[in-house]
Each structure stands twice: as structure tokens, then as C-alpha cells.
Amino acid sequence: QITLKESGPTLVKPTQTLTLTCTFSGFSLTTNGVGVGWIRQPPGKALEWLGVIFWDDDKRYSPSLESRLTITKDTSKNQVVLTMTNMDPVDTGTYYCAHQDYDSIDYAVYYYMDVWGKGTTVTVSS
Amino acid sequence: IQLTQSPSSLSASVGDRVTITCRASQGIASYLAWYQQRPGQAPKLLIYAASTLQSGVPSRFSGSGSGTDFTLTISSLQPEDFATYYCQELNSFTFGPGTKVDIK
């Protein structure tokens, strides 16, 4: 059974750096094709994809946030860490991590987020 | 790539057939997923590759489309289906704005 859990501060001040940890079980981030993604959701608003790290340490980030984001992994601890710099009140919301799996259909490969953590709420305020 | 969804919200009754549309700003072949999010919960994957039902998802959910136009259909709406539904493009991982389904 795959599970993921986000942890980190619930309150950060503007301009500070946010560090969130995703601790997972039930899979290994050394398995071919597997990844862990980060998604956030401002209160009452839509989901926003932030980035993903794959088993081979390949990383992809949202173009609009790439300059502020860093995602790293520690496979020995089964953890993925998201760092977001220069936090602003508009960054307030729920932050989720998710297991990213893939499927090959008709020679095309599809990556999707099949198991999500419950999310952690982050408020940016002075 | 940008995704739009229509309608942004709808009211329906238990047993109704519901269709939600997702449109991509450019062709994305079948690189689309659908998620359900109930209030206060994390999203749940329903469909990927436009029409492949995720394991454990009830068969009343179905997806179709390719290129720029996609649909999610719920054949007979159940009480637990009242939620917000998001589409996601599976190359850029961009999400659509969501469609809220509530009780009529």
C-alpha cells in the first residue's frame, strides 16, 4: 500500500523560504519510471502543479515558479523535499505530494499521479 | 498549454447523466487525466490517457476524446460523486480550472 505524508511549517513569513518534506512508503524512488510530484491549492481555488522528481533524479518544474523551486530526494529515507524561496501571501494554501506512476499504451507513455498525500496547510503572513 | 473546462459548475440530481468538457489550447493527443476532489480531501485519480479507468474507480465514470477536446461522463450520478472535477494535461502537468458538481 502506497502512502505519502507532507510535513513542514504551517506558518511562514513573507520573503522566507518554505521547506516541505514528503515522507512515503510502499514504493521506492529508485524504481524505473516512478516519481513524486508536488501540487498546491490556494483556499477555494484550483489545483496548481509545482514540479516532479523522477527515479533517475530528473526534475521538472512549473515554468512560472521554476526560479523559486527546488525538489530533492533522499532515497535512503524515502523522502522528497520541496523548497520554495521568497514566500508571499499568495503562496498560502494546501500543499500536496503525490506518487507518480506511468503506463505504456500503444507506444505512448503516460505519467499520472495515482496516490496523493492528505496535504499540509501553509499560511504566509507576517 | 492551457486547459479550459465547461461548465465551471453544474447542479444535478442523483441518477442524472453528467458530462464535463475539457479543452486544450493545442493538440495533446491522449495526454489527459481526470481527478475528483471532494471537499476537504485530496484529489483522486479517475482516468488517465483520456479514457483509461484507474483501478478501483467505478465504471459509471468514463472518459473520451483526443487532440483538443475531451469529456468526462458520469453515467448515473451517485451521492458520493458531488465534488469538483479537474482535468490535467500529462506532459506539462497543467491542471484545468475545475468543474464543481453540486446537488440540484
Image (spheres, helix red, strand yellow):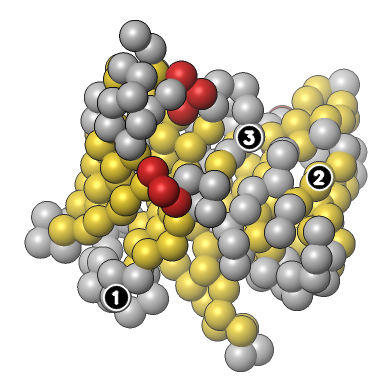
Q: Is residue B5 left or right of residue A83?
A: right
Q: Who's the residue at 81% across and 45% down the image?
A: B5
Chain where mark 2 sits: B
Q: Are marks 1 and 3 on the same chain?
A: yes
Q: Which residue is mark 3?
A: A46
**Label 3: few (<14), some or many (≥20) within 10 Å?**
some
State the image coordinates of residue A46 (x, y, percent, origin top left): 63, 34
Q: Report if residue B88 is visible in the image.
A: yes
Place residue A31 in its image quadrant.
Answer: bottom left
**Label 2: few (<14), some or many (≥20) within 10 Å?**
many
Q: Which residue is mark 2?
A: B5
Q: Amino acid at mark 1?
A: Asp
Compute the Cα span from label 2 to label 3. 12 Å
Image quadrant where one finds the C terminus of chain A: top left
Compute the Cα span from label 1 to label 3. 30 Å
Place residue B54 in its image quadrant.
Answer: bottom right
Question: Looking at the image, which is closer to me, B103 or A100?
Answer: A100
Cβ–Cβ below 8 Å for labels 2 and 1? no
Image quadrant where one finds the N terminus of chain A: bottom left
Chain where mark 3 sits: A
Q: Secondary structure at mark 1?
A: loop
Q: Secondary structure at mark 3?
A: loop
Q: Amino acid at mark 3?
A: Ala
Q: Amino acid at mark 2?
A: Gln
